Image: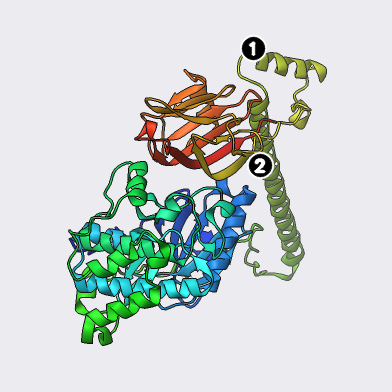
Amino acid sequence: MQRDDTTEVFQPLQADDPPVVAGYRIAARLGAGGMGRVYLSHTPGGRPVAIKVVRPELTDSPAFRHRFRREIKAAQRVRGAYTAELIDADADGVPPWLATLYVPGPSLAEAVARRGPLPVPAVLWLMAGVAEALQAIHGAGIVHRDLKPSNVLLAADGPRVIDFGISLASGITSHTATGTAMGTPSFMAPEQASAGELTAATDVFALGQTAAFAALGEPLYGDGPSVSVLYRIVHSEPDLSRLPSQLRPLIARCLAAAPEERPTPAEVVEWCRRHLGRDADAGAGPAVWREVTGPEPTVPDPVPDPTPVHTLPLLPQPWPRPQPTAPDERPSRRRRTALVTAAAVTAGALLLTGLTWTVMDAVDRIRDRAASASTTPPGPSASSSASASASKDGGRTWGRASRPSTTAPEPPQAVAYPFQMLTEKNSMSIKEPIEREDRKGDIRLVCKETCGLESRTSLMQLHLGKPGATLDACRAALAGDASRDLSLAWAAAGSEICLKHPSGDIALFVIQVKSTAMPQSGINFLTGDLTVWRAP
């Protein structure tokens, strides 16, 4: 089915979407990911851009801001015909954000879902374009580490590689970077799945998997639990018999188990050009490529700046001057006019003063309600507190004199600890330090007949309400049948687990990847983002 309207691409803004980000007026929502939301905006000259805005709960994490700065620096260093150029960014913004040129076209994942596997010529064009993008990326000393179909956009003139979210400077191992193997399991290289050293050849393996996905319409190593897919990637040879014969030699070289046996991106480009023949000189947008990308969506117009609102002045307009009919009438009419004008000005001033005091009194009442709600629970204690306050003041309840002298305590501040990984060899704590390389942490992954989480001190409960659990939602969940053991049988990617430490700290762990289908394999793991509300 061809995409024939813009509703699939450009989503209307919701109540919690910002109308403006760092001066960029937002026209539509483009999507959302693990780090935040992506919006459509325009440069002052009218060129469309994609604005990535970080989720608020991540902004207080120094580790996340460090990673976001790394993403910005990586994107700034990359210049190529097949990458989406970064044009603006602020890692210290509130919230942090970055802007890249908008690419009008679906992702490879969307295109395959819509029309099925790509024909051989389109796959060759795809591999050549992505390999050229990798040349630019690697030329800047960067390993992408998360090349996959959803990170390849299909424009009318060729593919674009996007999202340097977990990119890494060449020569640094995944151990020294994060302590975990980051990436998407179905498109990892063997050395990445086993947390080994990552090089430019790691991206070439992902290129082979991405090309195989385009040709087959599904992942080459199959679907299923992540741990099963990773096991096949590390320990088995891929089945290339289903691939078109023209593509098998190149994809087989890209998927070599030993990184040194894989081709370089330049060799991939040359191989594709040779097999495309004379069509290679026709540019990156032949008819077969345009058939894959579908019609280009109509980009919404830029949002105009708001028009200034002109209001009438508060003071009354001068009345028309009366025309005297006789000389002796002038003094008396002047006096009457002066008196009427003075009365009008006085009335206006009194009205404005009364309105000001009314607004101030309403604000005070709202503040008083908020303070009492946060400091005094409802019930007899609230009324007794009010009575005590009134008796101290001699029973008077005049304006601000009736307000309690105590101030409301500050609510707990959320602290984000993104990209946590639990295995059967490490652990995680709600108190600092969060990441533990041993089993002495507060939260541990335990796998016997099934897998679950256990703790010696903290309570845990799966949050079953609306996604995006808040502090109050976790408090409510933990007030039920919380325990120190939690089965992961019903948990999946996106599941939210509320935790409570004896100190009073409340935490939320959002699962990103769950790989526990083979409990006795010894290679089970859980990844996710942790948010902790520290007790005052």
Quadrant of res 487 = top left
61 left or right, relative to 188: right
- Kind of residue indicated by mark 2: Val
- Residue 119 x %, y %: 18, 69
Return the x and y of residue 275 as percentages of the image width and height. 23, 79
Percent position (x, y) of residue 517? Answer: 34, 35
Query: In the depicted view, which residue is nearer to us: 368 or 431?
Result: 431
Q: Is residue 309 visible?
A: no
Looking at marks 2 and 1 on the same chain, the residue that comes earlier in the sequence is marked by 2
Task: Estimate the x, y position of residue 224 in percent, counting from the top left.
Answer: 29, 43
Label 2: which secondary element: helix
Q: Residue at x 48, y 50 (%)?
A: 195
When asked about the image quadrant of residue 141, the answer is: bottom right
- Helix, strand or loop at disc 1? helix
Task: Between label 2 and label 1, give the one nearer the viewer.
Answer: 1
Q: Residues within 10 Å of mark 2 (few under 14, many from 20)?
A: few
The residue lying toward the viewer, choosing from 220 and 465, is 220
* Residue at 46% from the left image edge and 63% from the top image edge: 144
Q: Which residue is mark 1?
A: 380
Which numbered tag is attached to residue 359?
2
Q: How many numbered circles are shown?
A: 2
Q: Quadrant of the C terminus?
A: top right
* Relative side of 273 to 175, left or right: left
Q: Quick one: 124 or 341, which is closer to the camera?
A: 124
Where on the picture, by quarter, is residue 499?
top right
At x 62% / y 29%, what residue is drawn?
505
> Which disc is residue 406 wearing?
none
Vertical placement of residue 444 versus 376, above or below: below
